[in-house]
Every structure is written in C-alpha cells, then in structure tokens.
Amino acid sequence: MKRIAIYPGSFDPVTNGHIDIIRRGQHLFDRVIVAVSTNSQKSPYFSLEQRLEFLRTAFHGQSTVEIASFEGLLATYMKKKKAVAVIRGLRAVSDFEYEFQMALMNRRQNLRFETVFLMPDERYTYLSSSLVREISRLGGTVRGLVPGPVEIALKKRALTSH
C-alpha cells in the first residue's frame, strides 16, 4: 500500500518555499498530492488553471507528485484519495498556532487524519505568496523566490496593471 500525503494550499502563486516543502514530502511519502484549493469567497491573483499549470511545470516528469484541485473539506478529500497524512509547512512560530488548530479540527473530522509539519530551508522561512505578490506589485524583483514561469507571469501582471 502506497503512503500518500496531501499538501493543500492556494499556491497563489507557488513559491520556492512551497517547492521545497513538496520535495521534502517526496522523501517521506510514496506520493504527494499537491491540492490547490478553490475558495469562492476569495479572489485569487492567478486563476486556478494558472496555479495548477505553474505546479505542473515545476514538477513535470516527477511521477511521485500529483497536481490536483479540490474544494470542500480536506478530511473528505483525504478519505477520497486514501491519503495517510497532510503536509503543512511551518515557517515561523507565528504559523504554529493556526496550523495546530487546523490539525486538531481536521482530526476531529476524521480520527485517522494525521498532519505532518515540515520546515522549509532557512532561505524560505520569511517567504509567503502574499509577500511575493506585494513585492511584484510594487516593482521589486522576485527572482529566486518563485519558479521562472511564475516570475515571468508576475512581471507581465505588474506591467499591465500600471
């Protein structure tokens, strides 16, 4: 039986910190499903299809990573995918309280629900999608913070919004 983990998130956009967490998950699990969440109450910076494509490009040819989208309860999605764990990244102590609450609430939904917390490389501990979007919007460089295709898309978006 394969050990499947799900790494959920909005990935708006995917950063090198996300990529690092996914790679760390590949060492622990037979398969990592990167599950891009859809939330009708949010207006994402990039469309769902763009976010999925950024991830597919980053992990092209890697059979141990599956890129998918989901909506609804994560516990339900885990059951459907026969996953044994959820991967969550912790950048700083400030992330812990929220992630801890989510892990316990998810376990309440499904007693077999386990959460594995992974820390990114120290180069990415300050990195977030919202920070990347803000830097890009203000004309700063995001080189080294996001995969190349994301950097190009952010530049195009910044140019068209001015």
Image (spheres, rainbow, N blue to C red):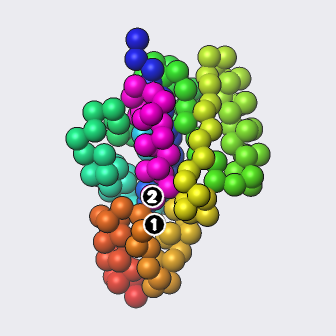
Q: Nearer the viewer, residue 108 or 32?
A: 32
Residue underneath mark 1:
145
The residue shown at (42%, 68%) is: 144
Mark toward the start of the polypeptide (1 vs 2): 2
Q: Secondary structure at mark 2?
A: helix
Q: CA distance from mark 1 to mark 2?
A: 5 Å
Q: Is residue 20 visible?
A: yes
Q: Secondary structure at mark 1?
A: loop
Secondary structure mostly seen in magenta is helix
Do the CB atoms of the residues marked 1 and 2 lie less than 8 Å apart? Answer: yes
Q: Residues within 10 Å of mark 2 (few under 14, many from 20)?
A: many
Q: Is residue 29 magenta?
A: yes
Residue underneath mark 2:
16
The residue shown at (55%, 32%) is: 86
For the N terminus, the quadrant is top left
Q: From the top left corner, tell me how far across and down residue 90 is, in percent.
A: 64, 48
Q: From the top left corner, tell me how far across and down residue 139 is, in percent.
A: 45, 85
| Residue extent of the magenta highlight | 15-33
Three-letter amino acid code at disc 2? Asn
Three-letter amino acid code at disc 1? Leu
Q: Is residue 18 magenta?
A: yes
Q: Residues within 10 Å of mark 1 (few under 14, many from 20)?
A: some
Q: Is residue 37 visible?
A: no
The residue shown at (42%, 35%) is: 26
Q: From the top left corner, tell me how far across and down residue 32 is, in percent.
A: 42, 33
